[in-house]
Image (cartoon, rainbow, N blue to C red):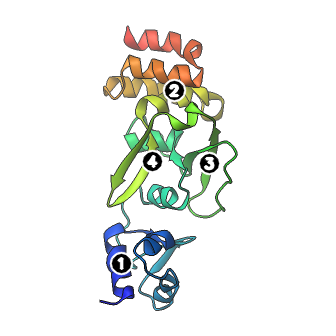
Amino acid sequence: MNQSDHILELARHLRVLGAADVRQQGWSPQLLLSLQQAGKLLRVARGLYSLPDAEVVEHQAAQEICKRVPKAVLCLLSALQFHEVGTQLPHELWIALPEGTQAPAPGYPTLRITRLRGAAYSEGIETVTQHGAPIRVYSVAKTVTDCFKFRNKIGLDVALEALKDAWRKRKITMDEVHHFARINRVEKVMRPYLESVAA
């Protein structure tokens, strides 16, 4: 097997690959372009390639973004959808980035970027590997408190639905919610809603 064959095999395994994946194996990233020009790889996003016949998998856009933007974390409506909490079906991908990080170049999918600092960014990140590709997403409890923090952006009704649904499905505990509410400074805002949910 030559390098090109190895790259195609890696693409079969990872589904979406970039120059860093190829370089890590000690192969030339230039081969990605030649394989694309030969029709053996498809460019799915800037710097990302997959096999032309690779089936589109659930959360593929999230996989691509997490690969392209190493600090991106699925948040808010996209995290709710990922965890199957509430009824939101966002047509954009909501990601969190640390303050001061450069925004990724526009492309597909359309991104809604939330800037967070310190523990509000770093706490509650879960890495879920699907089809060989890692997706970084906030935990359910962190996402619910984020919804209250950004209620002016997404609507209080969405935050309440997320809290009630996550509680009903037993995806959160009060201790977890209190922990993240403290980090997000929304304890006072959430208190009456938490009391009515737990009643």
Q: Position of residue 125 (x, y in %)?
A: 45, 39
Which residue position is annotated with label 2? 145
For the residues marked 3 and 4, what is the alpha-carbon distance in whole angstroms? 16 Å
Question: Is the C terminus in the top left, top right, bottom left or bottom right quadrant?
Answer: top left
Name the residue tied to disc 1.
Answer: 53
- Which of marks 4 and 1 precedes in the sequence? 1
Mark 1 or 2 closer to N-term?
A: 1
**106 with respect to 148 (left or right):** right
Q: Looking at the picture, which amino acid does disc 3 mark?
A: Arg
Q: Nearer the viewer, mark 1 or mark 4?
A: 4
Q: CA distance from mark 1 to mark 3?
A: 29 Å
Tell me which label, 3 or 4, sits earlier in the chain.
3
Crowdedness near tag 3: few (<14), some (14–19) or many (≥20) residues, C-alpha within 10 Å: some
Question: Of callouts 2 and 3, which one flags the residue occurring earlier in the amino acid sequence?
Answer: 3
Looking at the rendered structure, the secondary structure element under dot 4 is strand
Q: Are marks 1 and 2 in contact (CB under 8 Å)?
A: no
Q: Amino acid at mark 1?
A: Asp
Lower position in the chain sequence, tag 1 or tag 3:
1
Read off the residue under disc 4: 136
Separation of residues labelled 1 and 4 (CA atoms):
26 Å
Which quadrant does the N terminus fall into?
bottom left
Q: Residues within 10 Å of mark 1 (few under 14, many from 20)?
A: few
Q: Alpha-carbon neighbours of circle 4 within 10 Å: few (<14), some, or many (≥20)?
A: many
Q: Indicate whether 167 appears above or below 110.
A: above
**Mark 4: amino acid:** Arg
| Front disc: 1 or 2 | 2
Residue 149 seen in the figure:
yes
In which quadrant of the rendered view does residue 156 lie? top right
Q: Which badge, 2 or 4, is on the more N-terminal residue?
A: 4
- Callout 2 amino acid: Thr
Q: Which residue is mark 3?
A: 112
Taking the spot 57% from the left edge, 25% from the top edge, the residue there is 184
